[in-house]
């Protein structure tokens, strides 16, 4: 029997195999798939289906559909309901890599059944990009999650929801659609952390309904207006705006609910002013204080408690653009009331603690300190005293005079922080848990702290109970992980990389280092210059980091599936990578200007080529490009081409040249005075195929990406 017959026989036997009742993962690959495979075969990535439509027809609650990069010229529709605990998950294996480009006049995706997730797709050139709603307008569609997608150039709405209920739309980039970027009709929406711009009508349009939450979106340059909220926000919750540049603390509370008439100080929004007329008592439980970019020379002090499910949220409108630089003798933030969230600030210049949370004689609860950069303060970076079940996560804490993070109380959740170069003289560490039980210290990177890495208790007579997992503790002057007191049964120190600490890697009283721990160089990109991302062969470094896939659980189970530790923002899949995951998976929109493109294809096996010249201006908040470090990628029609980033050679005049290692490519990067970069790419020896005209070309470097459509030029030869 020849090989073709064998494959056909295998395909037939797999197609006839009975379907499994348990949750399954199906694979789809436009280039190599075959829709004749059965459901058992398609659970093997070697035998994927060709179309998403085939997978959606088979999926039931609890199933996951993983779609490989490529172009899918189909309109994708849901077929059946799932449940809250077992949704149907449709996921691109590379964020933005699976491109849904439906037939003319149809929607990219139409989800009309309950409890579906759509994650990580590019959707373009449809009627609506993603349409959500019950068939024939009957009843509400419940429990949908649309996240990490890039949705553009659709003739109607980017994302359109009709009769929605409990729908979350998050971390999407939605632009250049003919009508609204995001249009929502129904109740109980959660619309947050999206980038929405240059759409033909409104950016975000909430048409009706109640209990909506719309926050932390970047919305700009939309023709009809950026935000049009006609539905009611969550009952009793109010959002107040603060802007040091244009604000006025004499504005009323009603006026301050518009970003056009904000207050000037954060203190006014949080603490109120009893002498104002009409009197304002400060933010209440469930309220949000959104702070616009600028420098705020004040201390922010809490005055009243939030409540469970209704915290008082104090958030930077754009993370990393709001600096709190307090007066001498004062903390940047001083929180002494329950249920507060501090999110997205730069806190520096305090002569005492950067962020201080203090329960006094009692014990605070419901505190979240998230996404802040806390550095250059005269005592601890983040200090929590007499607190229970507080979370300190996703922060960067460096160059503070004492501890990076200091916690006393119970049930700490110290998660996914980068803590480095804290240099105190009083025996302080990167992370110190000084008292209490039930603590977790997970997925932190702790580097170069003068007195040590992680300290589990401060004296030999006061044990603490801490689970320490998935951390990278490296290059600290003292001990990597120290446990002064005889501790308790069940103490866990495992799955950590503890390496190169000059005092000792471990100084533990009774706890035994877990068998899954390692002591190896983690392969940071450039730790001397504070680049703690993990190196990989795929992004041009010399080797794969020893910390990849070495964690105690999966990245999704730990809540890190939407973050990455890599320069190319490749998602962390499978077992979690150790240490800090600093980058979110969605990129920042840059502006791409095409200055030249030529191509030759269908001229014979391995005889195709293209040249490309573009200018890429960085998007808002981007850190630009670092040749030899950052990842680069060009998408030429349906052909995706990763550019090598090792072997760049600096040339006079700010130019970097390269010749692709193992790839028939070469080119230059030339940085411009305005922050943009001119890029040339030449590639030959390829196998390209003509699809349609004009061809869309995309380029992405570091945090930036852009797209432009050009007419075909060069040589076109058909078979």
Image: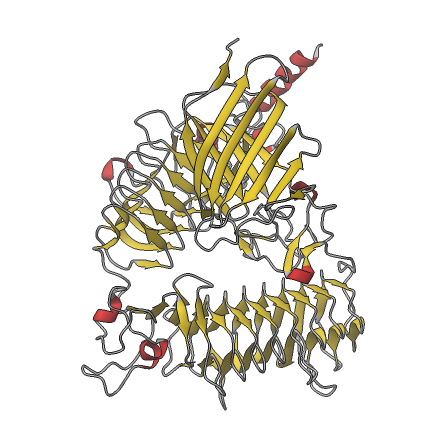
Corner quadrant of residue 136:
top left
Q: Position of residue 18 (x, y in %)?
A: 56, 28
Q: Residue at x 58, y 45 (%)?
A: 570
In the figure, is residue 177 to the left or right of 665? left
Can residue 21 be seen here? no
Can residue 712 be seen here? yes
In the figure, is residue 141 to the left or right of 251? right
The quadrant of the rendering that contains the N terminus is top right
Pick out the residue farthest to the bottom: 361
Instruction: State whether residue 410 is above or below residue 666.
Output: below
In the figure, is residue 582 to the left or right of 341? right
Between 37 and 182, the residue placed more toward the observer is: 182
In the figure, is residue 423 to the left or right of 478? left
Between 252 and 410, the residue placed more toward the observer is: 252
Q: Position of residue 210 (x, y in %)?
A: 24, 58
Q: Position of residue 557 (x, y in %)?
A: 57, 54
Corner quadrant of residue 352:
bottom right
Rendering colour mode: secondary structure
């Amino acid at each position: 029997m020849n090989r073709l017959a064998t494959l056909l026989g295998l395909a037939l036997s797999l197609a006839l195999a009975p379907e499994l009742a348990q949750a399954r993962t199906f694979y789809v690959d436009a280039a190599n798939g075959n829709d004749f495979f059965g459901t058992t075969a398609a659970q093997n990535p070697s035998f994927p289906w060709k179309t998403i439509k085939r997978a959606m027809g088979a999926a039931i609650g609890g199933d996951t559909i993983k779609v490989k990069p490529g172009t899918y010229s189909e309109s994708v529709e849901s077929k059946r309901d799932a449940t809250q605990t077992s949704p149907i998950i449709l996921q691109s294996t590379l964020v933005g890599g699976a491109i849904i480009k439906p037939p003319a006049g149809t929607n990219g995706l139409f989800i009309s059944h309950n409890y579906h997730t759509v994650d990580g797709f590019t959707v373009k050139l449809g009627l609506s990009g993603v349409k959500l709603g019950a068939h024939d307008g009957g009843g509400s569609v419940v429990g949908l999650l649309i996240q990490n997608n890039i949705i553009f150039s659709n003739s109607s709405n980017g994302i359109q929801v009709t009769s929605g209920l409990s729908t979350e739309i998050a971390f999407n980039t939605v632009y250049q659609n003919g009508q609204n970027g995001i249009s929502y009709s129904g109740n109980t929406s959660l619309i947050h952390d999206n980038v929405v711009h240059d759409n033909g009508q409104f950016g975000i349009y909430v048409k009706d309904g109640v209990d909506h939450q719309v926050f932390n979106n970047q919305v700009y340059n939309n023709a009809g207006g950026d935000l049009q909220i006609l539905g009611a926000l969550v009952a009793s919750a109010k959002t107040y705006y603060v802007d040091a540049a244009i604000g006025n603390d004499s504005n009323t509370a009603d006026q301050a609910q518009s970003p056009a008439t904000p207050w000037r100080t954060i203190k006014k929004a949080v603490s109120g002013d009893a002498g104002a007329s009409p009197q304002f008592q400060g933010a209440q439980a469930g309220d949000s204080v959104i702070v616009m970019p600028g420098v705020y020379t004040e201390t922010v002090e809490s005055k009243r408690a939030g409540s469970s499910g209704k915290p008082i949220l104090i958030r930077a409108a754009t993370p990393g653009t709001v600096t709190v630089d307090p007066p001498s003798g004062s903390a940047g933030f001083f929180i002494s009331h329950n249920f507060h969230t501090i999110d997205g600030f730069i806190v520096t210049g305090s002569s005492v603690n950067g962020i201080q949370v203090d329960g006094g004689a009692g014990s605070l609860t419901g505190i979240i300190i998230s996404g802040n950069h806390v550095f250059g303060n005269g005592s601890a970076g983040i200090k929590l005293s007499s607190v229970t079940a507080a979370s300190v996560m996703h922060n960067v804490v460096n160059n503070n005079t004492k501890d990076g993070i200091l916690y006393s109380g119970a049930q700490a959740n110290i998660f996914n922080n980068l803590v480095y170069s804290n240099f105190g003289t009083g025996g302080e560490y990167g992370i110190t848990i000084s008292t209490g039980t039930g603590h977790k210290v997970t997925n932190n990177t702790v580097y170069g702290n003068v007195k040590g890495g992680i300290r589990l208790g401060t004296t030999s007579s006061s044990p603490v109970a801490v689970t320490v997992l998935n951390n990278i503790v490296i290059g600290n002057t003292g001990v990597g992980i120290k446990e002064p007191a005889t501790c308790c049964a069940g103490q866990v120190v495992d799955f950590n990389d503890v390496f190169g600490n000059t005092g000792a890697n471990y100084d533990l009283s009774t706890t035994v280092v877990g068998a899954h721990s390692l002591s190896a160089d983690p392969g940071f990109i450039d730790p001397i210059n504070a680049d703690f991302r993990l190196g990989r062969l795929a992004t041009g470094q010399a080797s794969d980091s020893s910390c990849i896939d070495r964690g105690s659980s999966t990245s999704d189970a730990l809540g890190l599936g939407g973050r990455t530790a890599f320069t190319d923002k490749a998602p962390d899949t499978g077992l979690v990578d150790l240490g800090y995951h600093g980058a979110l998976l969605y990129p920042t929109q840059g502006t791409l200007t095409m200055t030249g493109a030529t191509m030759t294809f269908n001229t014979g096996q391995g005889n195709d080529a293209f040249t490309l010249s573009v200018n890429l201006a960085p998007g808002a908040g981007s850190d630009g490009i670092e040749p030899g470090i950052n990842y680069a990628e060009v998408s030429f029609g349906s052909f995706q081409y990763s550019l090598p980033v090792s072997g760049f050679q600096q040339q006079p005049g700010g130019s970097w040249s390269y010749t692709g290692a193992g790839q028939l490519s070469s080119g230059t990067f030339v940085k411009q005075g305005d922050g943009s970069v001119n890029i040339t790419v030449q590639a030959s020896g390829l196998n390209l195929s003509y699809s349609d005209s004009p061809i869309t070309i995309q380029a992405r470097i570091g945090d930036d990406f852009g797209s432009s459509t050009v007419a075909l030029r060069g040589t076109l030869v058909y078979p």
